[in-house]
Image (cartoon, helix red, strand yellow):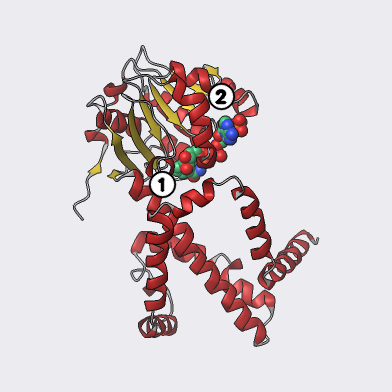
Amino acid sequence: MGTTIYTDGDADLRAVDGRRIAVLGYGNQGRAQALNLRDSGAGGERGTVIVGNRDDDYLSRAHEDGFPTSSLREAAAVGDVVLLLIPDEVQPAVFAEQVAPGLRAGDTLVVASGYNVAFGLLEVPDGVDVVMVAPRMIGAAVRSRFVQGAGFPCFVSVERDATGAARRTALAIARGIGGTRAGAIASSAREEAALDLFSEQAIWPAILSVLRTSYEVLHKAGFSDEAVLYEMYLSGEPAEVFTHVARDGLLGQLPLHSQTSQYGQLRALCGLDASDLAARFTSILHEDILSGAFAREWSAADAGQRLAQLRQRADAHPLSAAEQAVLRNQTRNQTRP
Ligand code: NDP
């Protein structure tokens, strides 16, 4: 509704002509974006796409793919447009120690996720543009879709425009990675980060909790673990349904189900009181996410330890054991001659 969607026609690759593009990190997004940018000719004849990484297998892979390679620190210093494509949780420390010292006024910092910018965790030197080009797509598909000539959704924003050219640069990079083919949505780091975190902290836990509670109820009623788990998700049917949801909409895909199913789903949906959920989701959005409380908690020194504890706690639910047993059985049956 009124949101700007940028397409190839709005994005001019010449905006980064002659500028060295440094891709920091050669993981999921790093490799895909570096290859796409090079294949797009980003940087023009005088520009180059270079890769910075720690000296390990990722760096060797970049070298084998034909990129000039160096340490993160060197690549950041040499690059005019610097793409920060290392995991979000390590960005603040790595950026402060190895990237920020190499940035000069006129350079552009490009992030692929709004998190660290939105929560003020990167101290970007004065005079440096900060933009976000955030594919809504896993790295492998950023590459495969580009090669097929297809697009993928992407969020784009300008977070700091020190040079007056930040938008043109952001759009050139978006175009170079293939992000304007299907339309790049004008957004902001705050919006991108908040939506991502909301999906992770409200939507998915609610779905997981619904499945766990369903298991508890059905198991208690005497239904077999195999039957329950295949009905809920092991069949892969929910994945099929969501493919249709993405194409036809939440209710638009309903005609694919039987009349009995449609009547049952709609009867239950219309009778459901979601006000408790709305209150909980509102609290998660404002008190945990937008306030920065979650970001502060996740930046704390003991965050990794807490993650391990939570994993252990979640795994103690009876559904985990049931799932493992059913999956083991399934593997055994599949390998049986
Ligand atoms: P990866 O986990 O694939 O990144 C791995 C890369 O980061 C490797 O090059 C690795 O180098 C480097 N790295 C990891 N830890 C460190 C460290 N401590 N110091 C230096 N380098 C390190 O990341 P993604 O590609 O998944 O994510 C990159 C960015 O893209 C993030 O901001 C993410 O939010 C965003 N994004 C990711 C998407 C996805 O689907 N994955 C989708 C859209 C955006 P080394 O060889 O040294 O370990």
Residue 219: % across, % down: 66, 82
Q: Nearer the viewer, residue 67 or 160?
A: 160
Q: Is residue 3 above or below residue 198?
A: above
The reply to whether the residue tagged 2 has its Cβ within 8 angstroms of ligand 1 is: no
Apparent side of residue 335 relative to residue 250 in the rendered image (left or right): right
The reply to whether the residue tagged 1 has its Cβ within 8 angstroms of ligand 1 is: yes
Apparent side of residue 8 relative to residue 52 in the rendered image (left or right): left
Q: Amino acid at mark 1?
A: Arg
Residue 194: % across, % down: 38, 53
Q: Which quadrant is home to the N terminus?
A: bottom left
**Residue at disc 1, secondary structure:** loop
The numbered disc on residue 62 is 2
**Mark closest to the chain's N terminus, 1 or 2:** 2
User: Could you tell me if the residues under marks 1 and 2 are in contact, i.e. CB atoms within 8 Å?
Assistant: no
The residue most toward the bottom is 221
Q: Which quadrant is home to the C terminus?
A: bottom right
Residue 170: % across, % down: 31, 32
Sort mark 2 into few (<14), some (14-19) or many (20+) by Cα contacts within 10 Å: many
Q: Which image quadrant for residue 106?
A: top left
Identify the residue at horizontal 62%, vertical 82% (top origin). 218
Q: Is residue 313 visible?
A: yes
